[in-house]
Image: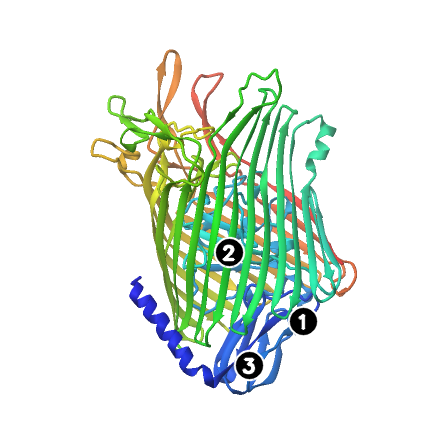
Amino acid sequence: MNLRIFWLLLVIGLNSNWAFSQEKVTLSGIISDLNSNETLIGVNILFPELNSGAITNEYGFYSITLPKGTYKIIISYLGFEEISETINLNEDLTRDFSLEESVESLNEVVIKKNVERLNIRKPQMSLNTLTSSTIKQIPVVLGEADVIRAITLLPGVTNAGEGASGFNVRGGAADQNLILLDEATIFNSSHLFGLFSVFNPDAIKDLKLYKGGIPARYGGRVSSVLDIYQKEGNSNKFHMNGGIGLISSRLLAEGPINKGKGSFLLGGRATYAHLFLPLFDIENKAYFYDLNTKISYKLNQNNNVYVSGYFGRDVFSFNDSFKNTYGNSVFNLRWNHLFSNKLFSNLSLIYSDYYYGLNLEFVGFNWDSGIRNFNLKYDFKHYLSEKIKIQYGLNSIYYKFNPGDIKPTGEDSGINADKLIDKFALENAIYLDVEHKLSNKLMASYGLRYSSFLRLGQDELNTYQNNEAVLYNQELQIYEKAEPIGTETYKRSDIIKSFGALEPRVALAYELNNNTSIKASYNRLNQYLHLLSNTSSPTPLDIWTPSGKYIKPQILDQVAIGYFKNLKDHMYSLEAETFYKKIQNRIDYIDGADLIANNAIEQVILNGKARAYGLEILFRKNEGRFKGWIAYTLSKSEQQTPGRTSEEPGINNGEWYSTAYDKTHDISFTGSYDLNRRWRFNANFVFQSGQPVTYPNAQYEYNGINVPNYGQRNEYRLPSYNRLDFSATYVPKPEKIKGWQSEWVFGIYNVYNRRNASSISFRENVDSGANEAVKLSIFGIVPSISYNFKF
């Protein structure tokens, strides 16, 4: 985007606001739930006579500037009673509103669904929003509602299969997703190697997934942003809810602190299937537990403080000789301040830590690794006029990377203590976002972000001839590690390498009529962190590493264009988008790369590039006894690593090849049907093209050993994946609205027991001596039952 045009539009907008500000007044305030005092996100504030309106932000705040006068105001939020009244605006006015739940909101299926509805006018595109109630309806394995599995039913989002961690967005890798919980970074989003996600649906207030058109306030990842906010808690009365399943349970408590002023929220989950294993003489263990907490307090009309946190751990052990522990810990202290009725601010101090620990008692050593960061953010939202809103802010993140620390478990251990060299970095950013109503038909969102990354000093860094850490052996025709010619030592305050980049963003929405619009967007993002993994799905042992002297930051350019339509007064909606994105400096690995406990990871890395393009279609039914959506994605995701010189072949002879997360076709359906107030039925169906894999295409014998010869990378594919799930929810006393309320959820995962291939390996048959392929399947049919309650 031309920077002169960007600043010109901004100056015009500011001047127009100044010219007319004396004739107008501002209405602002907070909108909350009458029963819980929980602030509400995405509430519509409408002035029909002016054809104007606003929506509440992440903290329930709204602000709108209008000409002086007396107008009808409508406050609407699905699942709540509508407020309609006449308001006299002769001067600036602060007015809070409390919405009361409507009768139909007693059925959790329809609570607060309007936040998921398509907004024709807003320029934001490639955005999906889900509520906690929607997530809870989707049938999943073992009966536990799951955020990550829910978003994989949306167009453009897949995962690497059953039992796989993370998710992939528009052909991007799992490490290219920025995952935020109350603004804190989550580095591993999965429990039990992908069977569960780390997000407790009971504690979730709002979830947004940005696949493109990413606002300038976000940065640091090149594929997507998953932004999740926790509930604030009920500041009027004590409330509890939870659930008991076959292998896991959860409980959440919330209540007031100084009634009407503050609140607390405390939620926990745990699995307990491992407690029954000793009954079967099985000493193995595999379980997780996590804790969500939040305290909110209103100091006065203009100041609110929030303290939130998350702690989770996974434990896997085998006969006390092997123990694996890993998980996330995050903490956030936030201060909301209202400088005026037009200027809202949020200051956050955030701590995030991902830990991985491994104890091998039979070998005699402990292994610890992880990544830790401290983040200071200060964000402002300025409601300049009814036509222009701007957001701006800055943030600074300090990183400490622990690649690995090996310690012997006792004096008789044969392992020597070894510490891989810690790495440090500082990532800074400043941004400006503008939302501009250019005309009654045309809306624009444009912004600019400047990011910088400083690779700070470390104890020791290898140096290489011609700065090449990887060499190509012409005789053997393979890539090899280069031998260091020396080392450099730095102080912590030294800067080994620095990067800086401008990241323009722009999105447009043109309203064809009240129910139809076309939208387009472009964004550039930089990613300075890399997950070292040569598997199709991240594992807890994978290590994060920063850009630096030998590893360049990834740079994304993405364009998208879409057609959006609401049908029959929002009962149905249609979204169709096509996208193209390219990524520079996507890392690849030489054949035989060893990533574990590697103190010189630059010796196995090559810089390449990636691209992805496709078509996404989402058709939703938003109202009625039957609700749901159908999503289809047609896409291609490829990577290329050419040789650095004409004498080098690169990877796959420098040709484009499919990434491990390329899925040509991805079809999903999810739906719910309300038979009556007691029974609700839900189902989802998934079909995906098989993921690319690399198979051996020949073998040869060397010194009596059969050695496989592998073909081109990701030349083959696993069989296609498909699955049907079903669940039924029974509410014994639907008329009960106070006291103990409960429901039973019966589910069947993989109804027709398809044995989908998680992987295919090759081995020699012990009887015939012939080679044979062996398919590994994680799940067949899995029934479940859970009991949910609240009081």
**Quarter of the rendering containing residue 228:** bottom right
Q: Which residue is mark 3?
A: 92
Quadrant for the N terminus, please.
bottom left
Q: Nearer the viewer, residue 57 or 300?
A: 300
Q: Nearer the viewer, residue 483 or 163?
A: 483
436 sits left or right of 117 in the view: left
Q: Residue at (58%, 43%) from the top-left corner? A: 328
774 sits left or right of 140 in the view: left
Whether residue 585 is visible, yes or no, is yes
Q: Nearer the viewer, residue 428 or 629?
A: 428
Q: Which residue is mark 2?
A: 377
Q: Residue at (46%, 17%) from the top-left corner? A: 768
Q: Which residue is mark 1?
A: 102
Which amino acid type corresponds to the residue marked 3 in the rendered image? Answer: Asp
Q: Residue at (55%, 84%) from the top-left corner? A: 91
Report x, y in % for residue 426: 44, 46
The disc, 3 or 1, on the residue closer to the chain's N-terminal end is 3
The disc, 1 or 2, on the residue closer to the chain's N-terminal end is 1
**In the rendered image of this protein, does residue 729 appear above or below residue 711?**
below
Which amino acid type corresponds to the residue marked 1 in the rendered image? Answer: Ser
